[in-house]
Amino acid sequence: MSFKYPLPNSNLYKKIDRTISPKCEMFKHGKQNLNNDDENATNYYFYSADFLVNNLKKFFTDEGISTENKTILDFAAGYGRTTRFFKPIFKEVTCSDLDQSMLDFNKENLGIDGFKSVVNFEEKFDVEKKFDVVFCLSLFTHFNPNIWEKWFKKVFDLVEEGGYFIMSTRGPELVKKFLGKKMEGDMSFLQVNETMGRLDPGYYGSISVSPKFVEEKTLTLKNISLLKYYSMGKCDLFQDVYIFQKRLPFLQKLFSLFISSK
Ligand SMILES: C[S@@+](CC[C@H](N)C(=O)[O-])C[C@H]1O[C@@H](n2cnc3c(N)ncnc32)[C@H](O)[C@@H]1O
C-alpha cells in the first residue's frame, strides 16, 4: 500500500491552472511509483510542488525579500509542474527545458514563455537576460559527476547580480530512506533515468550527493554565498534544497549599503 497524498489546500493552489500534459514524465513516473493510482498520482503531482513553493515563499517572506517585483526562471521546468505555482507570486515567470513540446505546453496552458536549453554545456543559451531568481528542481539530481560543476556554473550564470539560485539534490537522508543504508562517500551515480530513452543516461542519470560535494563544486565561484540549506523534508518532500545568492561586486555593494543607510 502506498502513501495516499491529499490535494493541497493552500491559497496558492487555488490560483493555478491544473492541466497535466499526458506527456509529462514527472506525472508518469509518479504514477508508476504509486501503483498506477491516477488520483493519488495527481494529488502527489500538485501536493509536492505546492509544499515546496509555499516553503520557498516563506523563506522570502522571512528574509524580508519581496518577490512580486522579481523575475524567476524555472530551469529544467518540464511540463510546468512547479513553474505554474510561481505565477501568482512573481512579477514574471520564464521556463526552459530541452523539448519544444514542453515549452509549447507551458505557453499554451500556463501562459508562461520559455527558451530551449542545450544538452552540451559548451553551447550558448538562446537568452540574453539574467533573472532575479533561478530555480532548478531535479536537474542536479541527474547530471553525470563529470559535468555537474560545469552545469552548475552555467545555470548560475543566468542569475542577476544580487539574485538567488535555488537548486535541489538527492541527499544522504533520501539514500538512507530508500536504500536503507548510509550513503558511501560524497557522491554516487547510476546510469539510469525516467525518460524512456529520451535522454542519454550517461549524461543524465541518477546522482546522489552530500552537502560536502556541493560545497566543493561551488568553492571555485568567487561571487556565491550559501544562504540556506534545507535537508530532505524541510523544504522539498524528498530532496535537499540549497539557496545561494550571487554576490554583488564590491563597489556596487558599498553603494547599495550607502543608499539604504540614507
Ligand atoms: C526530473 S525532471 C524535473 C522537471 C521539473 N523540474 C519538475 O520537478 O517537475 C528533469 C528535467 O530536466 C530536463 N533537462 C535535462 N537536461 C537539461 C538541460 N541541459 N537543460 C535544461 N533542461 C534539462 C529534462 O528534460 C527534464 O524535463
Image (cartoon, rainbow, N blue to C red):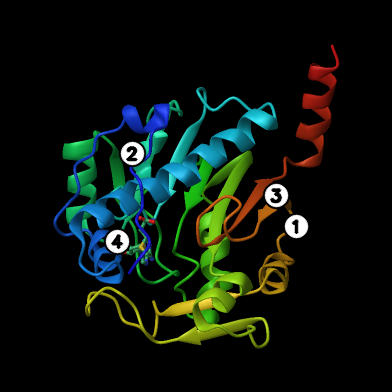
Q: Which residue is mark 2?
A: 84
Cα–Cα span, label 3 and label 4: 26 Å
Quadrant of residue 99 in the image? Answer: bottom left
| Quadrant housing the C terminus | top right
Q: Which residue is mark 1?
A: 222
Is 205 drawn above or below residue 226 in the view shown?
below
Q: Which residue is mark 4?
A: 26
SS class, disc 4: helix
Q: Which residue is mark 3?
A: 228
SS class, disc 3: strand
Amino acid type for the residue under numbered disc 3 = Lys
Amino acid type for the residue under numbered disc 1 = Lys
Question: Residue at the location (34% across, 78% down)?
Answer: 193
SS class, disc 1: loop
Cα–Cα span, label 2 and label 4: 14 Å
Amino acid type for the residue under numbered disc 4 = Met
Residue 53 screen position, x and y as percent? 48, 41
Residue 45 screen position, x and y as percent? 32, 52
Question: Residue at the location (28% across, 37% down)?
Answer: 112
| Marked residue nearer the N-terminal end (2 or 4) | 4
**Total marks in image:** 4
| Marked residue nearer the N-terminal end (2 or 1) | 2
Pointer 2 and pointer 1: residues touching (CB < 8 Å)? no
Question: Residue at the location (56% across, 40% down)?
Answer: 56
Question: Residue at the location (63% across, 50% down)?
Answer: 243
Cα–Cα span, label 1 and label 4: 35 Å
